[in-house]
Image (cartoon, rainbow, N blue to C red):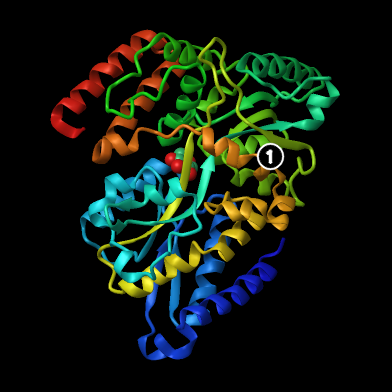
């Protein structure tokens, strides 16, 4: 899809919404024109979609909007926001916020409640809406949700008479068969499974899936207890360490989302763990794998406690407490998270809406058919322990992904390294952080 029709459609929608909100009626006219800055990621189509929606709002309100892109990798993005916000910088008005950050950045976010019409959070998944509230305050508006899924090459599985994997054992077996066959056929770069193994937030998400799918818990329980040092968790990490350099490239230890997508989308991997955004890009006309892949729930582990476990992710839009334009910035965030814009983002970019109604929208399901099973995946999805750890979440996550990265790198085995990480988390929590 080209960007022009999308922009036109968003503009028409903007006009409708702006009329409803009384913006065109002169509440905010040229006299009040302001220049706002939105910080949003640039993963795949994100940059264009973000710019088009913001521009549609700007056109209709007579303001101007500038788009800036923080680094794509979650942990680097957070570090930059922390710097900017600690300096109380008014340079960014609206910022894209990972679902695990409101507890960390809360003090620097504008309470949107006084700046928005009542009922702004209606129509979102109730759990998602609740996650952006803090008492009566609204710290952010849900923009899209994320639950990790398994991308698989349907053509190659069919060619080898293999089923979509149900368990990690199935995935390993299928990956070994197809990787050997592709290599024998001359594709030396072909790998069985790509995912995110860099030491950053994305690795915490991957590891949570491996561990939770084996019944090994969520590192830190909802009551704050530290649970990561257990045999199922150690087994899960040791299993993943066995993939590095065998079914997954050695370089996986530096991969974030876009690195995995680059390999899968070039046709050089059988399976990929990624978020929904990779679907639209993989099906785009210039993609070598368009029409040759599909999406399924992530595999489950083995044993009585095993389950399918997808990490719950997603992004909100928040307004900086240091904005010079609180009303306008809140309105821009409201517009960009509206049903119409979420619908466009789902159709053009397979971004999973936070609004249940859109999972019944024919055009959305036609563009991204896997969104039909996503609500079920979301209901079962595993949340990271961000709420219970509050401001310490980022440090807790760094302890987790640091330990996991060591195990993947072959520097320690799962049990020993998890015992050490348990001690580090105890120390952090004893400092009174949760
Ligand atoms: C995605 C998810 C986010 C997660 C990040 C990790 O952006 O939406 O919740 O923290 O990936 O890389």
- Label 1: which secondary element: helix
The residue that mark 1 highlights is 265
Question: Is residue 431 rendered to the left or right of residue 237?
Answer: left
Q: Determine the image quadrant of residue 385.
A: top left
Residue nearest the observer in this picture, 374 or 57: 374
Residue furthest out toward the left:
431
Q: Position of residue 111 (x, y in %)?
A: 28, 61
Looking at the picture, does residue 68 appear above or below residue 157?
below
- Residue 190 as seen in the image, left or right of residue 42: right
For image coordinates 34% across by 14% down, the residue present is 229
**Can you say whether 32 is above or below 234 in the image?**
below
- In this rendering, does residue 29 appear at all? no
Q: Position of residue 34 (x, y in %)?
A: 37, 80
Label 1 packing within 10 angstroms: few (<14), some (14-19), many (20+)? many
Please state if 110 lies on the left or on the right of 94 as rendered: left
- Quarter that holds the N terminus: bottom right
Residue at 54% x, 39% y is: 378
Counting from the top left corner in percent of width and height, residue 369 is at 72, 45
Residue in view at x 34 percent, y 8 percent: 416
Image quadrant in which you'd find residue 166: top right
Please say if 276 is above or below 59.
above
Q: Position of residue 54 (x, y in %)?
A: 50, 69
Nearest the viewer among 235 and 288 is 235
Residue plotted at (50% across, 26% down)? 209
* Mark 1 sits near ligand 1, with its Cβ under 8 Å away: no
Does residue 64 show up?
yes
Counting labels gives 1
Which image quadrant: the C terminus?
top left
Q: Which of 386 and 85 is in front in this view?
A: 386
């Amino acid at each position: 899809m080209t960007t022009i029709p999308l922009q036109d459609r968003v503009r028409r929608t903007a006009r409708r919404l702006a009329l409803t909100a009384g913006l065109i009626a002169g509440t905010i006219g040229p006299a009040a024109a302001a220049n706002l800055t939105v910080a949003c990621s640039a993963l795949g189509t994100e940059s264009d979609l973000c710019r088009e929606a913001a521009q549609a709002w700007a056109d209709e309100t007579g303001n101007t909007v500038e788009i800036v892109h923080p680094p794509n990798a979650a942990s680097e993005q957070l570090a930059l926001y922390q710097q900017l916000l600690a300096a109380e910088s008014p340079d960014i008005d609206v910022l894209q916020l990972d679902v695990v950050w409101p507890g960390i950045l809360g003090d620097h976010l504008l309470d949107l409640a006084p700046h928005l019409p009542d009922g702004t959070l209606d129509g979102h998944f109730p759990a998602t809406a609740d996650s952006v509230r803090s008492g009566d305050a609204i710290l952010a508006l849900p923009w899209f949700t994320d639950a990790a899924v398994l991308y698989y090459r349907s053509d190659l599985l069919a060619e080898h008479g293999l089923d979509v994997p149900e368990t990690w054992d199935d995935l390993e077996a299928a990956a070994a068969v197809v990787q050997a066959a592709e290599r024998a056929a001359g594709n030396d770069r072909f790998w069985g499974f790509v995912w995110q193994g860099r030491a950053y937030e994305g690795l915490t998400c991957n590891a949570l899936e491996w561990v939770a799918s084996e019944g090994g818990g969520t590192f830190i329980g909802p009551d704050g207890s530290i649970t990561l040092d257990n045999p199922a968790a150690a087994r899960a990490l040791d299993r993943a360490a066995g993939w590095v350099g065998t079914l997954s490239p050695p370089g996986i230890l530096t991969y974030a989302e876009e690195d995995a997508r680059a390999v899968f989308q070039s046709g050089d991997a059988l399976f990929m763990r990624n978020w929904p955004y990779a679907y639209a890009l993989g099906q785009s006309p210039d993609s070598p794998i368009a029409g040759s892949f599909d999406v399924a729930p992530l595999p489950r582990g083995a044993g009585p406690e095993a389950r399918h476990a997808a990490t719950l992710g997603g992004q909100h839009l928040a307004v900086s407490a240091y904005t010079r334009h609180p009303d306008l910035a809140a309105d821009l965030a409201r517009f960009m998270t509206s049903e119409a814009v979420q619908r466009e983002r789902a159709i053009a970019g397979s971004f999973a809406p936070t609004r249940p109604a859109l999972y019944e929208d024919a055009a959305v399901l036609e563009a991204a058919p896997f969104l039909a099973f996503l609500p079920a995946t979301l209901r079962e999805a595993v949340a990271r322990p961000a709420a219970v750890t509050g401001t310490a979440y980022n440090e807790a996550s760094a302890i987790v992904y640091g330990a996991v990265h060591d195990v993947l790198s072959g520097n320690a085995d799962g049990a020993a390294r998890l015992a050490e990480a348990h001690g580090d988390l105890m120390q952090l929590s004893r400092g009174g952080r949760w």
